[in-house]
Amino acid sequence: MIPLKKVFMLEENQTISNLTSANKDNDYTRIPVFRERVDNIVGIVNIYDLVDAKADESLKKYAQEPVYFPEYTPIENIFSKMKKDGLRMVVIVDEYGSCSGILTIEDCLEEIFGEIEDEYDVVEQKIINTKDGFLVDADIEIEKLSEAIGTTIEKAQEYETLGGFLLYKFGYIPQKGEKVIYKNLIFEIKSRNSKNIKKVLIKNA
C-alpha cells in the first residue's frame, strides 16, 4: 500500500489545467481526487479519459467512484477482486472510514509474489484500462494479451502479436475506426501507419 502522505492527489474542484501542470513531472496515469480533506478520497481520474476535456473543466466531472477496502482485508482477496473487475487502483480505509492509502494491482502482485519482473512493467505499459475498454499496443504478444484481458485469443503460425492477429483477420491493413468481432470482444483500430497497426481498443461486444 502507498501511504496517504505519499499519494499524489488533487482536490476534486481543481481543473484539468491544474492536473496537467501538477502531473507534468510525474506522468501518473491515475490520480485520486479528494473532497475537503485529503483522507476523503472520492474519485480516481484516468488521464486517458481527459483527451477531449476542456482545460477549465473540474476533475469532479471525470472522476470515477473508487472501490474501497478495509485495512484488514487480506491482500489475496483484494487482488482477486481487482483482477475480476479490471481494477488498477483501489482505496484503503481505516475503521473510521478515513482513507489511509491507495493500493495498485502492482502493489498486490509485489506483496503476493515478490518483486515484479520488468516483463510485467512492459505489459502494464502496453495495456491501458479506460472507461471504453482496453487500449492496447498492437505489438503485444498474443499470449500476454490473453492473460491480461482474461480471454484466450487463438495462436497460429501466421502471427505472434495482436497486430498480426488482426491483420490475419482483416486480410489487409485496416483503417482507423474499422472493427472486427472475435468471440465476445470488439477490436477497433485506433491508430496505424502505412505498414501496420499501432493501437487497438478492445471492448465487450
Image (spheres, rainbow, N blue to C red):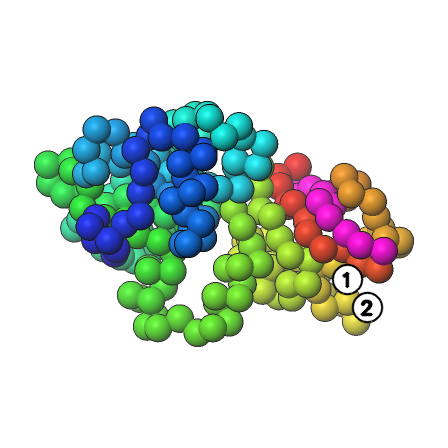
Q: Is residue 129 left or right of residue 167?
A: left
Q: Position of residue 182 (x, y in %)?
A: 72, 47
Q: CA distance from mark 2 to mark 1?
A: 8 Å
* Residue picked out by circle 1: 164
User: Viewer-proximal residue, 11 or 24?
Assistant: 24
Q: Is residue 65 magenta?
A: no
Instruction: Name the mark on residue 52.
Output: none
Q: Quadrant of residue 158?
A: bottom right
Q: Is residue 142 above or below residue 131?
A: below
The residue carrying pointer 1 sits among few (fewer than 14), some (14 to 19) or many (20 or more) residues within 10 Å by Cα, namely: many
User: Viewer-proximal residue, 25 or 135?
Assistant: 25
Residue at the limit of the structure toward the front, as seen here: 21
Magenta-drawn segment: 181-194
Q: Quadrant of residue 76?
A: bottom left
Residue in the image at 40% along x and 71% along y: 116
Q: Nearer the viewer, mark 2 or mark 1?
A: 1
Tell me, yes or no, whether the two marked residues, 2 and 1, touch with CB atoms within 8 Å.
yes
Labels 2 and 1: the sequence-earlier one: 2
Q: Is residue 120 above or below residue 79?
A: below
Q: Amino acid at mark 2?
A: Glu
Q: Amino acid at mark 1?
A: Gly
* Residue picked out by circle 2: 158
Picture quarter with the C terminus: top right
